[in-house]
Amino acid sequence: MNDDTIQAAGCVLWRRSPVDGELEVCLVHRPKYDDWSHPKGKLKRDEEPLTGALREVAEETGYDAVPGTELPTAHYLANGRPKRVRYWAAEAGTGSFAPNHEVDRLLWLSPTAARNRLTQPRDRILVDALLDALRLA
């Protein structure tokens, strides 16, 4: 990994449905990219990845999060630069969503529906990793 690598972090945010208790995964819609993804963002200078991941969840979703298992790290090119995104499973705590300039919509979906809604195939792997992590917990 070279010094040009963009460092980012995020969470696969989950909760138990208030209706039926089934597992739900949070996805955010970013109008700038017109995509559906997990909440994530670039780290601030000298920010610890987990701290940044929880900050991004709060900024993008309005929810506090309780971090759990670290999930697979994503590596890809963003505008020609290498990007590294570390992810954690995180249970949603208190909060509520309010649309903002980065995220205009939020959905709580079953794992299958979330996998189908995600824009990037690499993000689908994280749903499977979350399910594995929760089974082992």
Image: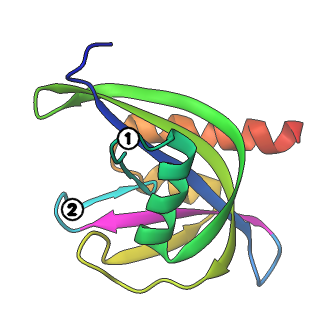
Place of residue 10 in the rendered image (x, y in percent of width and height, measured from the top left):
48, 48
Residue at 52% x, 57% y is 114
Can you give x and y, in whole percent of width and height, for residue 92 in the image? Answer: 67, 68
Image quarter where the N terminus lies is top left
Q: Amino acid at mark 1?
A: Ala
Q: What colouring method underlies this structural image? A: rainbow
Outermost residue to the front: 46
Residue 69 lies, in percent from the top left, at 72, 39
Could you tell me the amino acid type at mark 2? Asp
Which of the 4 quarters of the picture holds residue 126?
top right
Please identify the residue farthest to the left as the structure is shown: 80
- Residue 132 x, y percent position in the rendering: 75, 36
Residue 72 numbered tag: none
Kindly state the secondary structure of the residue where label 2 is placed.
loop
The answer to which quarter of the image holds residue 3 is top left
Residues in magenta, as a range: 22-30
What crowding class fits label 1: few (fewer than 14 Cα within 10 Å), some (14-19), or many (20 or more)? many
Residue at the spot of label 1:
8
Q: Return the disc, 2 or 1, that comes first in the chain's sequence.
A: 1
Query: How busy is the neighbourhood of tag 2: few (under 14 within 10 Å), some, or many (20 plus)?
Result: few
Circle 2 residue: 34
Q: Quadrant of the C terminus?
A: top right
Magenta-highlighted stretch: main secondary structure?
A: strand
Is residue 124 covered in magenta?
no
